[in-house]
Image (tube, grey):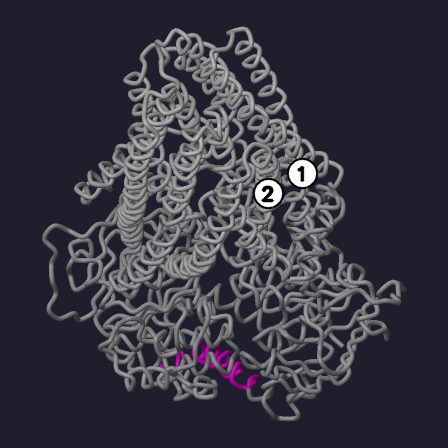
């Protein structure tokens, strides 16, 4: 049966522990390196930790005092009185004194235990608060490539469930293990002091216990491991099925999806049953060992009591102490579970913390007091994955205030150009200059302050419409928010919302249409009034012609006095830029005005022709 | 709560033989466990009165035998009860998924997935613990208390009464503390939800966070929810931490009372020392059950709360269900809307929409963002049901077709693509009962133009998608979704703005191939560009939920309304481009239609052109 109620805190650990991940699951319940590093987070609180340990020892001590007082009551009061060696009233007086001592010890023990629990919880939670914040901070500054590779669900598990599992370990696992060790040592000591021979008799059970524990630990390790892996699979499958329920239903896949789930669920059941079986043998076996030891204690002790080598009270005290002596072993499985979960979690958390950002701010950053907005790509080559070049030897220079469109087929590398200017990624060859300064010589925040981006997937934060436009920038006034919205023609739909600019929007902007989200993203970019504006055409591709015209209208205004780079695959959207850069398979193949490029009859002309042809004929419709 | 109980009983009933025998075995072990204190008392009395060692040896042997019986019974009982709880957990999990699969789409938009997941994990765990450990501990506790008190009264009424009075006190203490623990635990859970939500939002929107240099602000915001979580956890510990010390104190006090009062009685020779020790043994026997009583109460309270949350899921009724009197005539594909109105809650999205498409016909829908285009097409496969009006296919209300039949007839490519973490092959063949033949796969890949990309994948169609495999680009995802819909061989194909992430060239190729595929089938296409829709049999122009205009391309142009305006605008763009090209020779300056061309640096041609200019 479960063990100590112990400290408070994260109960989310166990079940939801492996919410999504099934990878990298350790089987170990103890790993010295990981533990040492975890303990490092307690260092700032070492005085408090020391105090907690002292309290723990004191309260363990308080727990073994009662059997000893019981012994005194039997030996000093009851037996002498019964045998007539002590007067009745004297016996009563002794009884009263012992009773008061007992009560005092009890009260102190309880109070200390409470204090120790609170202290442990606070220290553990605070240390894990620090770790969680450190992890979050660390993640904030990891490059975008990291987020491309790691799905949100995985990161979520790290920062929530994994850290909770560690909190569990610090507040419950480690403390109860310390407590158990202290208890076993203190009880052994007390037994040895009370009667070393009888103590040795009791210790006969130890080899049996050690053998039992060693045997079952192997079984437990495998079964916990199997459970964690299978539970993670079940939950990952559930999560995906729920997220894609519309597709499951539209394609009438309910039955096969259910069958696939049943298989996973059945595997999990089998693993759980294995564990139940193992534990159903382990705990009764340990319990039997305890009872048998007690019987042995009485047989051997009885002999010595008869020979008057041992007091009856001592025998009774031994028997009581024996009960506590075995308790830690009976709780073993719970602690094992906590420790194993924590080791797996800490391994994952630390691996994340050890992922270092490849995009760093320079030691001595160049500061540009005034940014004009000139961008130069100087022999830039770039690959997301080594060897798979997305951009090759790209050269161009965009003068301050110029507007440029980048066109090309999917995969030509257009989006990468935008990501590179924002320094979401670093180039492998060549350099990108902002007003003649390599952007790697500047602080990332400084670069991004001057570069406004309208991204492909307009992201809406939980909050209001206006908080989504200004984000956390308090310096952007309400008027500026409205002006920005007006500028991009977003004001009309915003004013139609129930609370206008203060309308609450939910996560992922589910209450807004795609077009509305995009208009908001525009307003957001404009509110920050950047010197350089980068626009991803995909961002506007889902907007109807009406709105797209409104946006283009806004863009035309925006481009004035601002370096603008627009990634467009619909040629009609780039009518009014100063210059067009045509990308093909990562290379700049043409550059010039719309007219010049058409005249060249090159790649641009071909793209243009395709666009034209698409307008003329291609559609899934049949003529009437 | 009543229905929660019915649910609980339903699942318990499935394993009643196993559970009942388990309970009996545990009860039996509790009975056997009460016997050794009697023997201990005898041994002590034998020692104080100077008896023979033979008797003590025999008594000890009986103790060992009893211990063996007790633990065998306990082990077997425990196995049966806990095994049942695991089977119930498995059953509930399966049933929950099966039930959720019947729920309508609006339900999943309303219930956040994360929240549902929390119920399927944390709440299910709490329910399982309530059933498994709950029953185990409850049986053990109640039986041990019962047998112990019966034995106590058999030995000494006064001491038994004293102990009996202490039991409700300890239970009350536990109960009051437990209530507070539960309350604070719920608060902690809710704070955990906030913490998760903040982290999720940040990770999902990391591009924006970085683009606008909001990292420090985000850290501050996260630190706040993190700090609140810490405080709530300490709040919980403040009451939770009381449990053990309180219990320890109460039990200690009980033992002290027994020793003190019993000690006096022993001195007065009203009680033998053996009986006193026997009482101490009894107290030791019930000390764990008394603690467990509090713990089991908590477990049951938390389990009941969790069961209530699961019950909410079970009680949610699907709004979209199979008809009672289904029609199973094969679907040909004539779609008709008769006076359809639809609202999400208060927000009216469609008003009085009527139109019809004959089997094999084509319909196109254009209109501004938010005009209700997606909603309209969602109504056909009954992702939603309209509040007013009727939608028929082949003259029969869609609500009268069995859902599987209706949905099998519809090939749907949604605006937002969702693929599963399975090999590409299975994603494409998702709508099929049997695996796709290689030729079908190639064909679907060709129509959707996915094939040319697949050729570059290491494992081709066996390439794993998602977290553990390759990450597809937006265009590749959309094309996979098109292949998936086409592979289904549907009577009605719906494309809901399904080419937005596909480049122009590929789009043209896909449309050309789709036209061939759709010759005999009904197609309904939501699009933005006139050129995509102009050949449709009928075009609907939606504006703010109503059909503003309708007709063929020609009709609509003659009508000279919204559509014509859209067309003119797009035409103008095209003409402008053509015009420019022609006028290049005349060195004519651009017309005013293009927004102001400040036009300074033109024709900045690069000198060396790359070679591979295919």
Q: Residue B14 in the image: x percent, y percent?
A: 75, 44
| Up/down of B66 relative to B577, above or below | above
Q: Where residue A51 is drawn, which disc sits there?
A: none
- Say how many tags the image has: 2
- Whether discs 2 and 1 lie on one chain: the answer is yes
Q: Which residue is the site of mark 1?
A: B84
Query: Mark 1 — on which chain does it sit?
Result: B
Query: Mark 2 — on which chain does it sit?
Result: B
**Distance CA(mark 2)–CA(mark 1):** 16 Å
Q: Is mark 2 on a helix, strand or loop?
A: helix
Q: Residue B253 in the image: x percent, y percent?
A: 39, 42
Q: Relative to B557, is B467 on the left or the right?
A: left
Q: Residue B10 in the image: x percent, y percent?
A: 73, 51
* Stretch in magenta: B566-588
Q: How crowded is mark 1: few (under 14 residues within 10 Å), some or many (20 or more)?
A: many
Residue A441, quarter of picture:
bottom left
Residue B234, quarter of picture:
bottom left
Q: Is residue B227 visible?
A: yes
Q: Relative to B573, is A102 on the left or the right?
A: left
Point out the image quarter for the N terminus of chain B.
bottom right
Q: Is mark 1 on a helix, strand or loop?
A: helix
Q: Can residue A428 be seen in this view?
A: no
Q: Residue A267 in the image: x percent, y percent?
A: 63, 35
Dot 2 or dot 1: first in sequence order is 1
Residue drawn at 73 percent across, 74 percent down: A623
Residue drawn at 72 percent across, 56 percent down: B6
Nearest to the observer: residue A552 or residue B13: B13
Nearest to the observer: residue A309 or residue A545: A309
Q: Main secondary structure of the magenta part?
A: helix
Q: Which residue is the site of mark 2?
A: B138
């Amino acid at each position: 049966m479960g063990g100590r109620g112990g400290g408070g805190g994260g109960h989310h650990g166990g079940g939801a522990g492996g919410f999504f991940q099934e990878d990298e699951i350790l089987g170990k319940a103890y790993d010295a390196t990981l533990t040492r590093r975890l303990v490092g987070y307690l260092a700032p609180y070492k005085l408090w930790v020391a105090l907690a340990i002292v309290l723990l020892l004191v309260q363990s001590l308080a727990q073994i005092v009662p059997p000893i007082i019981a012994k005194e009551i039997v030996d000093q009061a009851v037996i002498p009185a019964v045998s007539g060696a002590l007067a009745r009233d004297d016996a009563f007086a002794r009884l009263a004194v012992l009773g008061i001592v007992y009560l005092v010890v009890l009260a102190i023990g309880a109070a200390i235990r409470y204090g120790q629990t609170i202290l442990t919880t606070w220290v553990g939670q605070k240390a894990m608060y620090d770790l969680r914040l450190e992890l979050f901070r660390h993640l904030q500054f990891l490059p975008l490539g990291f987020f491309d590779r790691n799905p949100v669900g995985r990161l979520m598990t790290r920062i929530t469930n994994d850290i909770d599992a560690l909190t569990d370990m610090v507040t419950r696992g480690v403390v109860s293990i310390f407590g158990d060790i202290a208890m076993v040592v203190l009880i052994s000591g007390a037994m040895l002091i009370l009667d070393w021979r009888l103590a040795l008799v009791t210790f006969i059970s130890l080899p049996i216990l050690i053998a039992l524990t060693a045997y079952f630990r192997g079984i437990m390790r495998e079964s916990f491991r199997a459970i964690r892996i299978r539970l993670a699979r079940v939950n990952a499958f559930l999560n995906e099925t729920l997220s894609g329920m519309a597709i499951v239903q539209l394609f009438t896949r309910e039955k096969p999806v259910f069958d696939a789930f049943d298989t996973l669920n059945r595997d999990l059941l089998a693993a759980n049953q294995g564990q139940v079986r193992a534990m159903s043998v382990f705990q009764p076996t340990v319990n039997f060992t305890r009872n048998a030891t007690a019987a042995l204690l009485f047989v051997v002790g009885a002999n010595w009591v008869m020979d008057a080598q041992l007091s009856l009270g001592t025998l009774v005290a031994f028997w009581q102490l024996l009960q506590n002596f075995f308790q830690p072993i009976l709780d073993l499985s719970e602690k094992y579970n906590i420790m194993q979960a924590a080791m797996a979690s800490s391994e994952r958390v630390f691996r994340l913390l050890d992922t270092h950002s490849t995009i760093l701010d320079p030691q001595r950053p160049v500061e540009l007091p005034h940014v004009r907005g000139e961008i130069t790509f100087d022999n830039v080559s770039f690959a997301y994955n080594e060897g798979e070049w997305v951009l090759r030897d790209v050269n161009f220079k965009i003068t301050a205030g110029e507007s440029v469109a980048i066109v090309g087929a999917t995969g030509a590398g257009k989006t990468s150009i935008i990501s590179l200017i924002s320094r979401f990624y670093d180039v492998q060859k060549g350099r990108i200059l902002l007003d003649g300064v390599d952007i790697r010589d500047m602080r990332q925040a400084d670069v991004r302050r001057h570069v406004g981006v309208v991204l492909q997937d307009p992201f809406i934060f939980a909050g209001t419409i206006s908080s989504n436009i200004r984000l956390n920038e308090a310096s952007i006034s309400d008027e500026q928010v409205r002006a920005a919205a007006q500028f991009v023609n977003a004001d009309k739909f915003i004013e139609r919302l129930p609370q206008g600019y203060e309308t609450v929007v939910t996560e992922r902007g589910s209450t807004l249409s795609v077009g509305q989200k995009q208009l908001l993203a525009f307003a957001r970019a404009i509110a920050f009034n950047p010197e350089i504006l980068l626009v991803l055409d995909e961002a506007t591709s889902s907007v109807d012609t009406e709105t797209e015209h409104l946006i283009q209208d806004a863009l035309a205004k925006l481009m004035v006095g601002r370096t603008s780079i627009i990634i467009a695959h619909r040629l009609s959207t780039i009518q009014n830029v100063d210059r067009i850069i045509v990308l093909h398979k990562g290379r700049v193949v043409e550059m010039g005005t719309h007219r010049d490029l058409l005249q060249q009859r090159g790649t641009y002309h071909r793209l243009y022709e395709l666009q034209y042809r698409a307008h003329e004929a291609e559609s899934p419709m049949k003529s009437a | 709560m009543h229905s929660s109980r019915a649910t609980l009983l339903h699942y318990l009933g499935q394993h009643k033989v196993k559970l009942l025998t388990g309970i009996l075995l545990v009860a039996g072990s509790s009975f056997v466990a009460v016997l050794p204190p009697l023997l201990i008392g005898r041994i002590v009395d034998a020692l104080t009165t100077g008896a023979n060692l033979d008797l003590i040896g025999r008594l000890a042997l009986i103790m060992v035998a009893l211990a063996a019986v007790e633990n065998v019974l306990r082990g077997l009982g425990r196995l049966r009860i806990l095994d049942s709880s695991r089977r119930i957990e498995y059953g509930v999990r399966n049933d929950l998924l099966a039930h959720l699969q019947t729920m309508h789409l609006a339900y999943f938009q309303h219930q956040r997935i994360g929240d549902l997941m929390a119920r399927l994990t944390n709440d299910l765990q709490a329910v399982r613990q309530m059933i498994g450990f709950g029953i185990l501990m409850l049986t053990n506790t109640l039986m041990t208390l019962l047998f112990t008190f019966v034995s106590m009264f058999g030995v000494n009424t006064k001491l038994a009464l004293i102990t009996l009075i202490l039991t409700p006190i300890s239970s009350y203490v536990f109960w009051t503390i437990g209530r507070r623990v539960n309350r604070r635990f719920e608060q902690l859970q809710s704070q955990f939800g906030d913490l998760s939500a903040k982290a999720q939002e940040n990770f999902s929107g990391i591009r924006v966070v970085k683009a606008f240099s909001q990292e420090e602000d985000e850290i501050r915001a996260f630190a706040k929810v993190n700090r609140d979580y810490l405080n709530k956890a300490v709040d919980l510990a403040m009451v939770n931490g009381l449990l053990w010390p309180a219990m320890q104190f109460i039990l200690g006090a009980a033992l002290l009372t027994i020793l003190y009062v019993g000690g006096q009685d022993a001195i007065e020779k009203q009680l033998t020392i053996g009986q006193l020790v026997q009482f101490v043994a009894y107290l030791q026997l019930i000390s764990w059950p008394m603690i467990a009583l509090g713990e089991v109460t908590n477990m049951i309270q938390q389990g009941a709360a969790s069961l209530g949350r699961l019950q909410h899921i079970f009680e949610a009724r699907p709004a979209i269900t199979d008809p009672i009197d289904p029609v199973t005539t094969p679907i040909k594909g004539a779609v008709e809307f008769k006076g359809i109105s639809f609202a999400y809650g208060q927000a009216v999205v469609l008003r009085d929409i009527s139109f019809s498409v004959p089997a094999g016909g084509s319909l196109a829908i254009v209109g501004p963002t938010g005009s209700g285009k997606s909603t309209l097409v969602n109504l056909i496969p009954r992702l939603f049901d309209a509040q007013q009006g009727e939608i028929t296919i082949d003259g029969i209300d869609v609500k009268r077709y069995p859902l599987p039949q209706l949905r099998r007839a519809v090939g749907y490519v949604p605006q937002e693509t969702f693929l599963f973490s399975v090999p590409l092959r299975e994603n494409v063949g998702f709508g099929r009962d049997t695996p796709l033949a290689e030729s079908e796969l190639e064909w679907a890949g060709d129509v959707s133009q996915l094939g040319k990309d697949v050729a570059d994948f290491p494992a081709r169609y066996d390439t794993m998608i998602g977290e553990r495999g390759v990450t597809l680009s937006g265009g590749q995802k959309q094309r996979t979704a098109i292949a998936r819909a086409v592979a289904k061989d549907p009577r009605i194909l719906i494309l809901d703005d399904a080419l937005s992430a596909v480049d122009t060239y590929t789009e043209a190729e896909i449309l050309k191939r789709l036209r061939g595929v759709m010759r005999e089938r009904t197609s309904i296409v939501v699009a933005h560009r006139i050129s995509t829709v102009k050949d449709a049999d009928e075009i609907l122009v939606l504006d703010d939920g109503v059909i503003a205009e309708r007709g063929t391309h020609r009709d609509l142009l003659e009508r000279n309304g919204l559509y014509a305006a859209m067309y003119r605008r797009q035409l103008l763009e095209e003409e402008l481009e053509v015009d420019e090209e022609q006028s290049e020779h005349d060195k004519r300056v651009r017309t005013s239609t293009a927004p102001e061309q400040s036009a300074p640096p033109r024709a900045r041609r690069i000198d060396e052109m790359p070679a591979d200019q295919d």
